[in-house]
Image: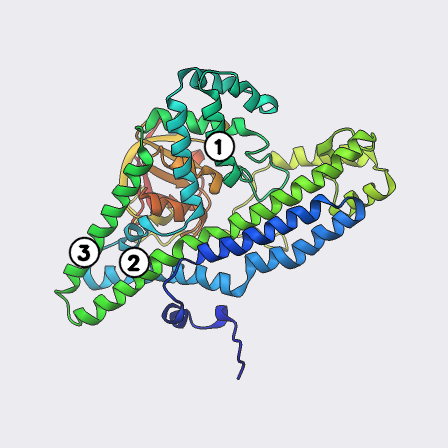
Amino acid sequence: MRSDPNPVSAPIGILVAILPVADPAVSASFYSDVALDHLRHRLEGLSGDALFEAILDDLKQQLKTDVTDPRSMAVVYVGMYALNWINKRMARWVGVSGAGDVLARSVANDVTSEMGLALLDVADTVRNHRAVMAALPDLTDASFFAELSALEGGEVVSRSIQNFLSNYGMRCSGEIDVTRARWSEAPSTLVPVILSTIRNLAPNARAARIERSRREVEEMREDLIQRLEQVPGSRRKTRKLLRMIDRLHNFSGYREYPKYLMMRHYWILKQAVLSEASKLAERDVIGRVDDVYHLSFDEFREATRTGRVDPELIAQRSDEFEAWSRLSPPRVITSDGEVLGGAYKGERVPTGAMAGIPASAGTVEGRARIVHDLTELELEGGDILVTTFTDPSWTPVFLSVKGIVTEVGGAMTHGAVVAREYGIPAVVGVDGASRLIRDGQLIRVNGTDGYVQIL
């Protein structure tokens, strides 16, 4: 018998029983901070072939260990299991749907939901300075903070935004693509979100939301306990529920941490390779720094060795990228190129409604706002966000809407996790939602049963 069983292969119920009630992101954050600081200092002293070798070493060793370590994945699975257990058992035992979704509104150490709340603090700082608010839409990335500091109140706002970027500046829309401009590279992309927050939320919204979530969680917890007192086996079932609530609270937030850690790694690596790209541009090996985005890792590495790049190859790949970017990919495609389809069972979906995956419980009605690009964000109070997909960069937008509909996603994707924590009804995986729903239409979102209706 093995003495070091892989926790992921163990029955999830056993993991729930043996894992301690703790805040896993706290210790994980400490150790990853040390490793990332070491990586940053190591890369700063390298260039050329030695730099590329160090990057490969990090990708194959440290990043793989940090992100896919079986113990880390076990923590993620326990949080998922606890949510699913509460939702299913409470619906079966006491007839309450979406109980786990409500109880997930106050979990510990979720770096993604904390990021959205942190931007509320930035918005509160900005709203106190009218000159800054008026100037923000016209600031350019190249001189963003210099222009900002020249305004009345600009120094205070600049410090607030830079503090935010020190924790979250490596994020951006479509962040898994390392070529996308990070918030630290393009701070102006945050402006529409900040101004939308100021328009739609009252001052001190962070504290108000935290208190509301705490109160809703406590009310749901007490309601479930009271209901369980009326059913057979109440003591045993109550003990199980309380244990699962503890697991949900302490482990669910960790779901967001591996991706956050990955983006921190990528940001350090990107800064290092762009430094090499700048050297190539200075030597006229490439026309501009971002030409290297059209080279493979090995081709980029070879260019630093030889000082030669085929400009026609870069032009060809640039054209191909533009052509591919205009296509609409299928939702599912196999490695053989087969496109798969399917349909929801839809037993609880009314006739004419659009079926999806219930991601965050609750039902709301409001005006649909179709958004594909955060830089063009124009939300008003009571809007429902409808889009193709969301990633962590969309999190601050969630705070300004009353419901969420996406075409892509699942119950444990970033958007679903954060929607539950913020208490926003959400349905994901609604095929063609941004095409079938017109901007401005009145819609109903049922995040408990998983459907959307045009009213």
Determine crowd level at label 1: few under 14, some 14-19, many 20+ residues with C-alpha closer than 10 A: some
- Front label number (3 vs 2): 3
**Which residue is drawn at the image coordinates 43% and 51% (left, top)?**
410
According to the picture, the residue beneath numbered tag 3 turns out to be: 222
According to the picture, the residue beneath numbered tag 1 turns out to be: 372
Does dot 2 land on a helix, a strand or a loop? Answer: helix
User: Which residue type does callout 3 highlight?
Assistant: Glu
Percent x, y for residue 377?
44, 27
Q: Nearer the viewer, residue 394 or 439?
A: 394
- Front label number (3 vs 1): 3
Q: Which mark is residue 87?
A: 2
**Which residue is drawn at the image coordinates 47% and 57% (left, top)?**
27
Does dot 1 land on a helix, a strand or a loop? Answer: loop
**Which residue is drawn at the image coordinates 57% and 44% (left, top)?**
176
**Which residue is drawn at the image coordinates 56% and 57% (left, top)?**
66
User: Which residue type does callout 1 highlight?
Assistant: His
User: Which residue type does callout 2 highlight?
Assistant: Asn
Earlier residue among tags 2 and 1: 2
Position of 131 relative to 267 (above/below): above
Quadrant where the image shows the C terminus: top left
Earlier residue among tags 3 and 2: 2
